[in-house]
Image (spheres, rainbow, N blue to C red):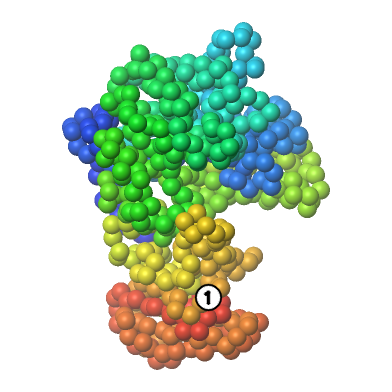
Amino acid sequence: MKNLFLAFCVLFSFQNYAQENSFSGFLKVEGQKILNDKNENVVLRGFGLGGYMLQEGYMLKVPFSGQQYVFKAHVQELIGNEKTEEFYTNWRNNFMQKKDVDSLRKWGFNSIRLPIHYNLFTLPVDQEPEKGKNTWLEEGFRLTDQLVSWCRDNEIYLILDMHATPGGQGNDVNIADRDPSKPSLWESQENRDKLVALWVKLAERYKDEPVIGGYDLINEPNWSFEEGKNINGTEDSKNTLLWEFQKKLTQSIRAVDTNHIIIIEGNGWGNNYNGLIDLWDDNLVMSFHKYWTYNTKESIQNFLDFRKKLNIPIWLGESGENSNAWFTDAIGLMEDNNIGWCWWPLKKLGSNNPIEIKINPGYEKILKYWKGEASKPSASEAESAFMNLAENTKIENSIIHYNLIDAIIRQPRNTETKPFKIHNIPGDEILAADYDMGNDGFAYKDKVSGNYWVSENSKRVRWNNGEAYRNDGVDIYKEENLLYVGNTESGEWLKYTLQVIEDGVYDLNFKLTSPNNEAKASIHIDQSKIGEIVIPVSQEWNWIKIENVELNEGSHSLVFRIENGGLKFEKFSFELK
């Protein structure tokens, strides 16, 4: 019952934000703003559906090259072509359902970015039975139509994002499922013609559909058009072909659709806008992507300058893959500057996204086989593992990380802490990992709470070194049935909200260990220090007690402050005397 109550409280807090920026007709550009048909300013708050129509290897934890076609070939090697196609049909049917869109709306989001793989809509150029013609495939349109319907029911804008173009748009081959042995988008006029035809086909289909928020023409181009420059296009000074082709795409779409916003992206993963001197359409939005950088105004100043110079709205079309603290700071920065945003991704095999797809034991064995650490599974074992993996993409079979959603939706505008779980006193043993939800410095304090490796020109770091359970800076480890906070440093702390249901005097018991040095912590209730505990050097877990803690019925806070680090902390409890 208490978990149901908590879920209701969390959902209620999200719904308070869900009412903002309500859906109303076609989106349009007015100067530097995106408006609805009531001329209200719209801040897009959304998630990208990475892994749905287009898989990237890291989302599946594979140990080899990350293009989807490479992963698919490995699946085919284990279960054959027919069962592989069945797996992909199940994957796409399960990955996004109406209940996913319903949830996004309830959580407070007003938009979705759909990463499209072109090969669900049309054949690759080299597979066309008649050269220069386009064979249209039903699967991509079917999936998009049903997503449009679910978004319409929820009044959520759907942005179509061409994530994998014919031939692929860059040297970062995983993003677009690119086969580098074949001509890229930029090396083949046939590939570019096919992309034009696909965008026209989509525009014809959805030209009168106001739930479509816009057309994101080419995701993250990363290709140098200038000799001697960085191959990913980060240093190009003109980007001539990129701008000429996006202009052609716009003109082709406008021949059939004058209603929808068109979103352009720069080179170098969307951020190099060199050579863009003026605009070719009055309903354009400039997208940029932001990962692993400082969340300061200086970090986005060049895009703010472009917005002013070109008199165009800017949109953070993709970001994420970081900690809750980073998310909160980044979204606060965007909204302070009237910039909409779209996080990445909604689901994957991993915990730094709202919906975590569970790894079944059979798929774990397959991953070990691919790493050379286990024998090859039988075809029937592999089939069962892949079909279970597809089944686990359903939201009801996944792990929902409400603390992450809270960090994205509520925490950028509210520093109040919320209980992660309801802790009743007496009665409950409270896990150390179940500290409150809230900002770093309010619900917890950790020395490393985000990944800033691009700004710092350093290696990527983990914020949660245990990579388990939650997405804050707190280092949480899972070992079989044991879940604990570890890698603790002096000055770090954790805050818990307690619900005392019986007045009385209690003994407070902590389960801890400190394998390498004598550690120390101080305990504070309602901002008053009630005592200190010393954790002797030991490889064993021990209970350490603070006696005679007087508590009145009602809500209280407990802060566990680490004075000398090195301890591991599993749980604590109150025993009524």
- Classify 529 as above or below 380: below
| Residue 47 percent across, percent down from the top left | 41, 42
Q: In the image, is 7 to the left or to the right of 468?
A: left
Give 101 or 240, whichever is nearer the viewer: 240
Q: Residue at x 27, y 52 (%)?
A: 336
Check the picture and name the quadrant holding the N terminus: bottom left
Q: Is residue 190 left or right of residue 319?
A: right
In this rendering, the answer to whether 557 lies above or below 77 is below
Nearer to me, 238 or 317: 238
Question: Which residue is labeled 1 in the image?
Answer: 488
Which residue reaches farthest top?
Answer: 130
Which residue is found at the position 43% from the left and 76% from the top? 493
Q: Helix or strand or loop: what does disc 1 sit on?
A: loop
When the figure is inspected, residue 356 is found, relative to residue 51, above or below; the finding is below
Q: Position of residue 425 (x, y in %)?
A: 39, 76
Q: Is residue 240 visible?
A: yes
Could you say which quadrant of the image residue 170 lies in?
A: top right
In the rendered view, does 277 fall on the left or right side of 54? left
Which residue sits at x=42%, y=36%?
Answer: 274
Pinpoint residue 360: horizontal percent, then vertical percent: 64, 49
State the residue at coordinates (35%, 69%). Answer: 442
Q: Position of residue 413 (x, y in %)?
A: 28, 57
Toward the viewer: 181 or 214?
181
Disc 1 residue type?
A: Thr
Residue 260, can we see it?
A: no
Q: Tell me where residue 303 sits by quadrant.
A: top left
Image quarter hosting the C terminus: bottom left
Q: Neighbour class for label 1 at 10 Å: few (<14), some, many (≥20)?
A: many
Toward the front, the furthest residue is 228
